[in-house]
Amino acid sequence: MTDVDRRTFLSSAAGTVAAMALVPNLNAFASYSLNAPLRVGVVGVGRQGREILGELTKLPDVSVSAMCDTDARRLSAGLRRASGAEGFDTVEAMLSSGKVDAVAVATSTHTHREVALKCFQAGVHVYLECPLAHTLEDCIAISEAARNAKGVVAAGLQGRANPVYQLARGFYKTDSVRDPVSMRAQHHRKTNWITPSNDAARREALNWKLDPSRANGLAGEWGTQQFDVFHWYTGKYPVKVFGSGSVRHWRDDRKVPDTIACTLMFDDGQTIHYDATLANSYGGTYEVLYGSNAAIKLGWSHGWMFKEADAPTQGWEVYANRQQFHNDEGITLIAGATKLAEQGKLKEGIGLPHPGVYYALEDWINAIANNGTPACSISEAARATAVGIAANRAVMNRDIVEIDFAGL
């Protein structure tokens, strides 16, 4: 699968005029052909597991045949969403049942190592949600075990399989952006991060994200996905990070900050400025890469390029769809623009029809069918997770932390 398809498309609105477009090959995602329906089991059917379950049911030649969760209520809710699937309360029972060819793991982060290693040993294909783990030790163990896995192993860092992000990366690699200046990202969502339960033991198990011994806070749980986008675009990794955080809204004796800010530093002086909060939703989730010719803003389902006034024109801009943002005008990055332009339906292609996890899962299934390589490897996920772990430590200590990639 290529990141982008570089093509020249023709617009016939007023004669025949050539213009260049950088377009991801969307057809490659659905080009797989399986000899028989792939039987997929889902381990962990909480919020993320249910989303994965829903997206798997959209994919051709895929059957959700089993699911596993140690929480009986969640397992029951998941089974209602997948007709014909069988439920299990242990991973071992599901793997030994003979009912799964592949497994999507969406359990809590601190349990990934135990579950993943059992799936690798069983020889099934594995999709492992990210962050990869909550400690560097677990990241190393998962990475080492994945190298010997018989099945196709994919990490759930969604940006790399996202068609809009693939398209934007094509522009980033050209002179359209030119000299890299800086990067920033945010994740804003107003939510208390609490799953209620009247049972104390169940409440503790469900709310692992608020336990510093089991999770890496906003920087690890949310930031890892976004840090990886910058790694993928630039081909390099930050070497240290400064962070700070505090509880600004949810004053319920939690030990994890609900609002954080980090500065990640590269050895060449570039920086990523990152902030996240559970207290305000304004602006949502996005990443921005600033260059001397343009800035690219990525919003997971959408993408835009903002050209500088002195940036050279390349010809295709006159045909591009544009959106106004206050005093700035953004060129909309549209997946499949060549085909849509030929049909006169360019504006209909704004935004993706599915959430990011759909494309990550589709990429995994495509790699299984074609004996290929998934968009995101476990080793890349381990490095992104290491950055998230370091960023969280910097936040908790309000200090500068060196990022450790040893063994990854």
Image (tube, rainbow, N blue to C red):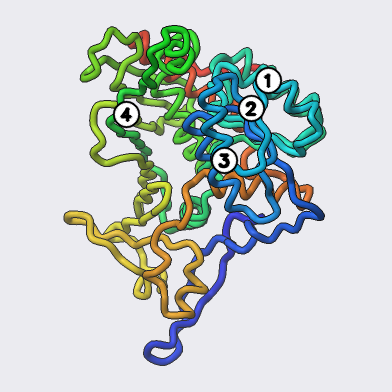
As displayed, is residue 314 above or below residue 101?
A: below
Q: Residue at x 68, y 49 (%)?
A: 62
Tell me the CA gap for discs 1 and 3.
Answer: 18 Å
Vertical comparison of 293 with 396: above or below: below
Mark 4 residue element: strand
At mark 3, the secondary structure is helix
Distance between mark 4 and mark 2 Cα atoms: 34 Å
Nearest the viewer among 171 and 395 is 395
Q: The N terminus is located in which quarter?
A: bottom right
Cα–Cα gap, marks 4 and 1: 37 Å
* Residue 252, placed above or below residue 42: above
> Where's residue 223, x and y in %?
43, 29
The residue lying toward the viewer, choosing from 236 and 81, is 81
Q: Which residue is mark 4?
A: 275
Q: Quadrant of residue 66?
A: top right
Q: Which mark is residue 53?
A: 3
